[in-house]
Amino acid sequence: MHTAIEHVALDRVDFNDHTFQVRTPGPVGPLARAIGQMGLLNEPFVRARGTCLQIVSGFHRMRACRDLAWETLPVKLLPSSTDTLGMVRLAITENVFHRPLDIVEQARCMGMLVGHCKLNQKALQAELNHLNQKKWWGMRNKLIAVDGLSPDLKAALGADIVGLPVALELAQWEDEAARGMVNLFRRLPMGLNRQRELVTWIKEIALRDKCTLARVIDDNRPRGSDDRQAGDRGVQTRRLRDRLFARRYPRRAKAQADFDAKASKAHLGPGIRLIPPANFEAHQYRMELGFQSRHELRKRVTQLQKAMTHTNFNDLIPG
């Protein structure tokens, strides 16, 4: 694609037009300092739209130059005959080879191809092959869904505050509830499996109790007292899970509490752990013995034999 390098007035640039922006906006301070010291080594791509200039690639560089209070800067001016697909190709290519794109940025590229260029499935697959992004084809439905997320969910997904399956689930929630979950996961970072577990429980509680998702979240979110009593976020996360588990499964939670209370009185001693039946629905118990030598194993067995003669142990296990 032939381009001409021209010096243009910075006040002609339309900074509000993000049509072709691929990268998620971020701070440009370090980039501005580098440009201030070394100059603009790679000119941004723009096209003329009336008296304004539309950025096609180089959004961060443009912002850095604006922060440096430049009045003019060199740009690569695209021919007026450049079609939308050509500009989308340029924007994607410039960014893909600069650094790996995260899931939100990949989705933005897919949104450009499907939304701006109106490509059908066959043309989309061919274009992804042309861009050397064949892997996006297998992810196309998820990427299109991610591109349709709210700005808040996109930001949370891009910052790894929520996992992709959770973000797609929260997209179906009311805005207030989705924001509440994002704020909760921002305050208490946790893995994807734990996020999915809590999201599922909250949905089921709201459905059973005939209340809003936002109400369930607000009822169970950490309070100021949690911060004062436990600065460890792991402790706060366990407390949150315990509260939601107790509300979702009150009978199982009570059975677990009763079992724990009895187990604490059973004199099992260190290194011995009695595990109740799964969900308290089966009948098989399991015993774990922790040891580092045969001597320690014999000691644990002796402890266990002694505990089995205690009344509280007999109350713990029926029969």
Image (cartoon, grey):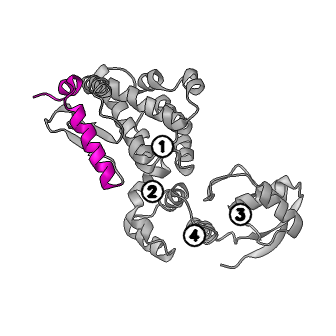
Q: How crowded is the residue under tag 2: few (<14 C-alpha within 10 Å), some, or many (20+)? A: many
Q: Which mark is residue 43?
A: none
Q: Which residues are magenta?
A: 293-319
Q: Nearer the viewer, mark 1 or mark 2?
A: 1
Q: How crowded is the residue under tag 1: few (<14 C-alpha within 10 Å), some, or many (20+)? A: some
Q: Which mark is residue 143?
A: 2
SS at circle 3: loop
For marks 2 and 3, give the CA distance.
23 Å
Q: How crowded is the residue under tag 3: few (<14 C-alpha within 10 Å), some, or many (20+)? A: many
Residue 75 as seen in the image, left or right of residue 252:
right
For marks 4 and 1, give the CA distance.
37 Å
The residue under the point 43% across, 39% down is 170
SS at circle 1: loop
Q: What is the three-letter code of the residue carrying label 1?
A: Met
Q: What is the three-letter code of the residue carrying label 4?
A: Arg
On the question of residue 182 being in view, the answer is: no
Q: Which mark is residue 89?
A: 4
Q: Nearer the viewer, mark 3 or mark 4?
A: 3
Q: Nearer the viewer, residue 196 or 65?
A: 196
* Residue on which disc 1 sits: 190
Residue 147: within the magenta? no
